[in-house]
């Protein structure tokens, strides 16, 4: 399984990542102003620049590119490799988490105060956890293949939009935009990989929950504290991976058209001129729609908070919380809602 690429100066990369997301936010504001003044080619270009900087900010944060690679254009190959590395990382995180859980099981089993009944349950849970670990390792190649098929279908659909991006929009083409935005607004890593990896996560957390329910409160808190930070980091990584997967799809129509909105270009017997780009041009419609979703969902603001490691806004907290819940993280201990049905006396 390939490892994510590391940089010799991670602190410098994190600083660059923070600066890039700030620039992405500024570029989007500039695009909005340019649209207001009907400077459409310039507005489209700034939208593209904003998306590219946001993508690179996440790639740096997730250590999928080095700072030396920032000048490279975001091409389809870079996108594909980066998203595949995300899948590998999620699988690696699961194996790390499962390893921590097995260590916890061993430590609880060694506790003299733990009853034989609970020790037998621990042995049963351990065998199930080991089976899930083996399944995860065997599943890696299958998950990547499923991912590639899902990704290729989506990119084929959005490539069609890229090919007609400089044409005047029609009722049919605007329907295509709406459909693609609908799919990509709800499009996420779970859909791409059919939820296979997260299904395995869920099974592991069900086993953790089973163990928690038979332990006394002190043990529950101890186990929860050990796992809590690991779960949160996976949730944060998953959130950034989701944002990356959405942004790279939104960026795709700009890839083949960015030079066309900046300079006149001869294609065959005709000249493509930026001066022909107006309110009804499809790439303008696409840019405005993407900008609207980014603002309404506060996507950039949440990315900025995750990069800085300071989650403050309501929407960003809700996003991370949703991942923690999806991953079956046991928060009841913290909220004093988990009532022990321990088989041993406290």
Image (tube, helix red, strand yellow):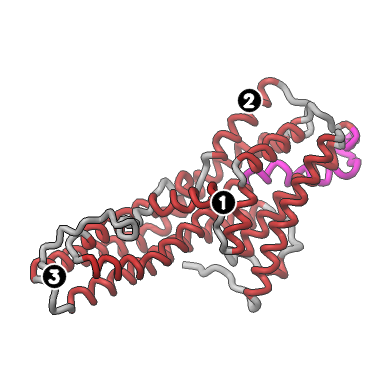
The crowding category of the residue bearing disc 2, from other C-alpha atoms within 10 Å (few below 14, some 14 to 19, many at least 20), is: few
Dot 3, crowdedness within 10 Å: few (<14), some or many (≥20)? some
Q: Quadrant of the C terminus?
A: bottom left
In front: mark 2 or mark 1?
1
Does 311 lie within the magenta span?
no
Whether residue 279 can be seen here: yes
Quadrant assignment, res 216:
bottom left
Percent position of residue 195, x then y:
40, 48
Residue, disc 2:
175
Query: Mark number for residue 166?
Result: none
**Helix, strand or loop status at disc 2:** helix
To which residue does mark 1 refer?
313
**Residue at point 51%, 69% (across, down):** 3
Of helix, strand and loop, which one carries label 3? helix
Q: Nearer the viewer, residue 74 or 328?
A: 328
Residue 201 visible, this orientation: no
Q: Quadrant of residue 129?
A: bottom left
Question: In the rendered image, which residue does mark 3 sit on?
Answer: 119
* Part of the protein shown in magenta: 248-275
| Closer to us: 116 or 194 | 116
- Count of labels shown? 3
Which type of secondary structure does the marked residue at label 1 adopt?
loop
Could you tell which of marks 2 and 3 lies nearer the N-terminus? Answer: 3
Q: How many C-alpha atoms fall within 10 Å of the one at disc 1: few (<14), some, or many (≥20)?
A: few
Depicted 314 relative to depicted 288: above or below: below
Residue 250 within the segment the image draws in magenta: yes
Q: Using the rendered view, name the quadrant where residue 207 is placed.
A: bottom left
Give the mark, 3 or 1, whose residue is nearer the N terminus: 3
Mark 3 and mark 1 residues within 8 Å of each other at the beta carbon: no
């Amino acid at each position: 399984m390939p490892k994510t690429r590391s940089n010799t100066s991670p602190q410098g990369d994190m600083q660059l990542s923070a600066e890039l997301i700030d620039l992405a936010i500024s570029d989007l504001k500039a695009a909005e102003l340019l649209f207001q003044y009907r400077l459409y080619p310039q507005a489209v270009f700034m939208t593209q620049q904003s998306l590219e900087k946001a993508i690179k900010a996440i790639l740096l944060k997730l250590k999928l590119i080095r700072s030396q690679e920032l000048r490279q254009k975001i091409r389809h190959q870079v996108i594909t490799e980066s998203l595949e590395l995300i899948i590998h990382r999620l699988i690696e995180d699961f194996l790390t988490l499962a390893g921590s859980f097995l260590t916890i099981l061993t430590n609880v089993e060694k506790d003299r105060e733990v009853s034989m009944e609970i020790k037998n349950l621990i042995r049963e849970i351990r065998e199930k956890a080991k089976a899930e670990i083996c399944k995860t390792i065997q599943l890696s190649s299958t998950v990547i293949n499923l991912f590639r098929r899902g990704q290729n279908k989506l990119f084929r659909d959005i490539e069609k939009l890229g090919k007609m991006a400089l044409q005047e929009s029609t009722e049919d083409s605007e329907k295509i935009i709406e459909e693609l935005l609908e799919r990509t607004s709800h499009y996420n890593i779970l859909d791409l990989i059919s939820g296979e990896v997260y299904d395995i996560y869920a099974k592991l957390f069900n086993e953790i929950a089973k163990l928690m329910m038979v332990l006394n409160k002190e043990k529950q808190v101890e186990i929860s504290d050990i796992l809590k930070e690991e779960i949160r980091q996976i949730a944060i990584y998953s959130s950034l991976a989701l944002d990356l997967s959405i942004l790279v799809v939104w960026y795709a129509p700009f890839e083949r058209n960015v030079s066309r909105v900046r300079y006149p270009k001869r294609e065959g017997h005709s000249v493509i001129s930026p001066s022909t780009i107006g309110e009804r041009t499809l790439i303008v419609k696409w840019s405005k729609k993407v900008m609207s979703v980014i603002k309404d969902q506060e996507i950039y603001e949440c990315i900025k908070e995750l990069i800085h490691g300071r989650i403050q806004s309501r929407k960003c907290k809700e996003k991370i919380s949703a991942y923690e819940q999806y991953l079956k993280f046991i928060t009841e201990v913290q909220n004093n809602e988990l009532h022990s049905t321990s088989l041993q006396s406290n």
